[in-house]
Image: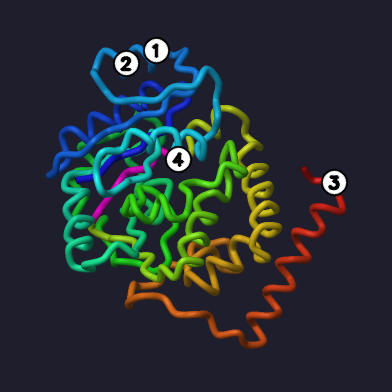
């Protein structure tokens, strides 16, 4: 069904957990493609020993370049964008396939729901060392939620023809930060209006493990850097695009906006609030330029 692209940067134990969950919890047969960055932790040996398809770089080239390289090995019609710190819950792919069949065309972006460090809070462990798989599986029916509007997150599913139309992932955002919302904007520009998160398709997310273990302040830095690139490229900051176009993003208290999916999105209403928020967002990013943020 899907070509699953998994960039990995010296994250062997999480990669193992991710791939093991795909093998035992998928209802359909998928193509797994890993991109190994460096692989000095044994992950290169792991993919070879397990006969996994992979691409490789001697250094960490970041998520955008890794996804683009891995996508060249795709043999199937649909591409699933993944991280290596996901645990895919049983039947995660059933709702995705059901929605693909129901939509009946290729102009969509669908995602599973991230549990843990994601859209739905649930603590089954913050690392693979303290991961409580039994607790997670025993609570799946409680965790399942509504289908939601405006998703830009992973695991994200797209038709390969659409992936090619927009040129894959934008490499100027490397190593990461803002690249997922940039991808959504590229889809918006070719008139895709279905951005649907599926509340019954679940993936437990340990949460930006690669970024956090590298440097505590790096995650914030990459987000701000990505916001600057996004603004320069598209004329909006990231949260503005997510809030007014995708009906998602963050509210004023930095909480996720979680609106129930009601159908394809429409153009935003360009009222006074729209223009006030647009100007405020641009001033915030302009301030970063003034203080020399790079």
| Location of mark 1 (residue) | 42
Q: Are marks 1 and 2 in contact (CB under 8 Å)?
A: yes
Closer to the camera, 9 or 137?
9
Q: Tag 2 or tag 3, which sits nearer the N-term? A: 2
Q: Quadrant of the C terminus?
A: top right
Q: Residues within 10 Å of mark 2 (few under 14, many from 20)?
A: some
Q: Is residue 129 visible?
A: no
Q: Tag 3 or tag 4, which sits nearer the N-term? A: 4
Q: Quadrant of residue 273?
A: bottom right
Q: Is residue 159 left or right of residue 283?
A: left
Label 3 residue SS = loop
Question: How much space separates mark 4 and mark 1, taking CA atoms?
Answer: 21 Å
| Location of mark 3 (residue) | 292
- Is residue 8 a member of the stretch shown in magenta? no
Q: Tag 1 or tag 3, which sits nearer the N-term? A: 1
Label 1 residue SS = loop
Question: How much space separates mark 4 and mark 3, taking CA atoms?
Answer: 29 Å
Question: How much space separates mark 3 and mark 2, taking CA atoms?
Answer: 43 Å
Q: Is residue 161 left or right of residue 165?
A: left
What span is colored magenta in the figure? 201-207
Q: Tell me which residue sits at (87%, 53%) in the image.
A: 290
Question: How much space separates mark 3 and mark 1, taking CA atoms?
Answer: 39 Å
Callout in the foreground (4, 3):
3
């Amino acid at each position: 069904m899907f070509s699953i692209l998994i960039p990995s940067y010296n994250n062997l134990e999480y990669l193992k957990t991710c791939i093991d969950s795909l093998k035992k919890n998928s209802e359909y047969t998928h193509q797994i493609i890993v991109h190994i960055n460096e692989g000095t932790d044994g992950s290169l040996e792991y993919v070879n020993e397990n006969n996994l398809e992979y691409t490789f770089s001697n250094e960490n080239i970041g998520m955008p370049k890794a996804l683009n390289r891995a996508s060249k090995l795709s043999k199937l019609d649909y591409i699933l964008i993944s991280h290596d710190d996901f645990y895919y819950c049983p039947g995660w792919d059933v709702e995705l396939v059901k929605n693909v069949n129901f939509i009946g065309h290729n102009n969509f972006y669908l995602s599973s729901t991230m549990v843990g460090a994601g859209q739905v809070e649930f603590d089954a462990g913050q690392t693979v060392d303290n991961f409580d798989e039994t607790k997670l599986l025993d609570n799946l029916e409680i965790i399942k939620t509504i289908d939601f509007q405006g998703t830009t997150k992973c695991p994200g599913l797209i038709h390969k023809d659409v992936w090619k139309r927009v040129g894959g992932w934008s490499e100027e955002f490397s190593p990461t930060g803002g690249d997922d919302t940039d991808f959504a904007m590229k889809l918006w520009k070719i008139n895709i209006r279905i951005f649907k998160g599926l509340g019954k398709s679940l993936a437990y997310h340990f949460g930006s493990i690669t970024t956090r273990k590298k440097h505590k302040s790096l995650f914030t830095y990459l987000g701000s850097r990505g916001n600057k690139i996004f603004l320069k490229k598209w004329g909006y900051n990231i949260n503005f695009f997510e809030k007014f176009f995708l009906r998602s993003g963050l509210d004023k208290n930095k909480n996720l906006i979680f609106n129930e999916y009601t159908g394809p999105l429409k153009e935003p209403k360009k009222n006074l609030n729209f223009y006030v928020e647009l100007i405020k967002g641009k001033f915030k990013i302009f301030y970063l330029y003034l203080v020399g943020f790079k």
